[in-house]
Amino acid sequence: MIVPKILLDTTGIIVISVFAVALVLLIAILFIYFYSSKKKKGIQKKKEEQVIEIHNDDKFIESLGGLDNIEFYELKGLSRLVIKLKDYAKFDKEQIKRFYVSRILEMSDKVILVGENLKPLLEILDKSKTN
């Protein structure tokens, strides 16, 4: 009886193995990316809610020197809030930093508050100006 020789093509097996490993790694990377971005959005939303819950509107306005001290304000993007004040001596830097402002840039004619998302602060200013 003659036993047929079975030729195994190991290159094909290796190529398939490499693609399978690459596919598994790609799926793992995509899963980690989407999971971390979803978690980051959740953290950002909690921060926004904390700004409004912990600090009331009056404290933010008071730290700017009162409603009468504000001449002009504008949100540029989500991370920069430009505020022009009448009297900069009334501006309280330490209290402003409690409102998730990471940096304060002071210029001769305006103050720029820099943070991750300052839209809640803009909403506080808008609400105060309309009342």
Image (spheres, grey):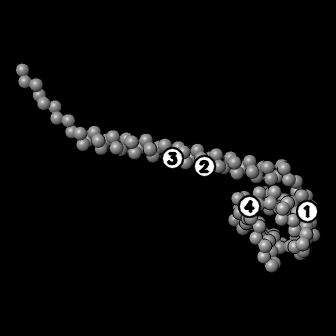
Q: Nearer the viewer, mark 3 or mark 4?
A: 4
**Residue placed under numbered mark 2 in the picture:** 37
For the residues bearing labels 1 and 3, Cβ distance under 8 angstroms: no
* Neighbourhood count class around disc 1 (C-alpha, 10 Å): few under 14, some 14–19, many 20 upward: some
Judging from the image, what secondary structure is the residue with disc 3 in? helix
On-image quarter of the N terminus: top left
As rendered, which of 124 and 98 lies closer to the eye? 98
**Type of amino acid under label 3:** Leu
Judging from the image, what secondary structure is the residue with disc 1 in? helix
Q: Quadrant of residue 117?
A: bottom right
The CA span between labels 3 and 4 is 31 Å
Q: Position of residue 35 (x, y in %)?
A: 58, 44
Residue placed furthest toward the bottom: 108
Q: Earlier in the sequence, mark 4 or mark 2?
A: 2
**Residue placed under numbered mark 4 in the picture:** 102
**Residue placed under numbered mark 1 in the picture:** 62
The residue depicted at 83 percent of the width and 49 percent of the height is 53
The CA span between labels 2 and 1 is 35 Å
Q: Earlier in the sequence, mark 2 or mark 3?
A: 3
Q: Is residue 37 left or right of residue 81?
A: left
Question: Residue 4 has which mark?
Answer: none
Q: Earlier in the sequence, mark 1 or mark 4?
A: 1
Q: Earlier in the sequence, mark 2 or mark 1?
A: 2
Q: Position of residue 28 (x, y in %)?
A: 49, 43
Q: Quadrant of residue 78?
A: bottom right
The residue depicted at 70 percent of the width and 51 percent of the height is 44
**Residue placed under numbered mark 3 in the picture:** 30
* Neighbourhood count class around disc 3 (C-alpha, 10 Å): few under 14, some 14–19, many 20 upward: few
Asked if residue 85 is positioned above or below residue 43 in the image, the reply reads below
**Type of amino acid under label 2:** Ser
